[in-house]
Amino acid sequence: MDTKKMAIIATKGTLDWAYPPFILASTAAALGYETQIFFTFYGLQLVRKDLSVLKVSPLGNPGMPMKMPFGPKWFKSINWNMPNAIQAIIPGYENVATALMKQTIANNGVATIPDLRELCQEAEVKFIACQMTVELFGFEHSDFIDGLEYGGAATFFEFAGETDICLFI
Amino acid sequence: MNFDKELDARGLNCPLPILRAKKALAEVTSGQVLKILSTDPGSVKDFAAFAKQTGNELLSTAEAGGEFTFFMKKK
């Protein structure tokens, strides 16, 4: 049987959007897929050495439940959504939301992004960073983890053209 | 049921039980049986799908008090 293949384009650079590419890639690798992720635009944040740059923002994100990860059950079930105009003027709002999200993730036995990324690397998921966006955003190769390859659209198609599953995230 | 290795994936959520199982299966030989404990309700469908796609045989699935026990035989 031929090895199945999957390619993912990761374009988002927030904590919440870091999950789908790494969950799918690590699971695909466990199922025996040869897997590649092409990181471009804001997706480059997912291959930074320092992952503390990943944040989540409830601002302009009406789908995000704002619930507290501690306290009694009645307290945890309150949804703290508030108008965008108010969210926007509270200093540090994003940092607080990110800290609460990380606590919720830990409470639910969900892996952290550094862990999932490492699991992908252990499973030999190939990471390719878009060289054009590296330059566009003024990054240096030293900002990124080791083991990355740098390439462009043609590099992506070389592998993507042979895949069974190809996703844009 | 007899088993050769046990994996405690209780408290872990998707996709960790599958990733840990894959790792544990790499540490047993063909024909040996891995016992997996999990509390993730999604793992029931996931382990069936994992078995189907990897060729490892899911010998049994059981649930008791919110805990799931799987026996998987390595291909």
Image (spheres, coloured by chain):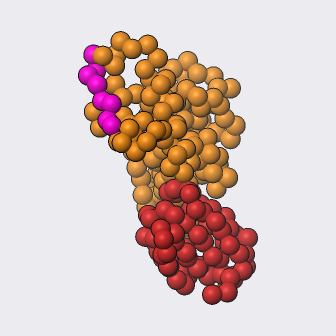
> Residue at left 42%, top 58%?
A165
| Quadrant (top left, top right, bottom left, bottom right) of the C terminus of chain B | bottom right
Residues A138 and B30: in front is B30
In the depicted view, which residue is nearer to us: A27 or B69?
A: B69
Residue A5 coordinates in the image, percent (x, y): 50, 60
The answer to whether residue A9 is above or below residue B9 is above
Task: Tell me where the magenta segment starts and ends, as one range.
Answer: A78-85
Chain painted orange: A
Relative to residue A15, is residue A127 depicted above or below?
below
Q: Position of residue B58 (x, y in %)?
A: 53, 80
Apparent colour of chain B: red
Residue A53 screen position, x and y as percent: 55, 26
- Asked whether residue B23 is in view, the answer is yes
> Which residue is at a point 32% across and 35% down the rendered structure image?
A79
The residue under the point 56% across, 57% down is B11
Residue ID at (70%, 37%): A146
Report x, y in % for residue B7: 65, 68
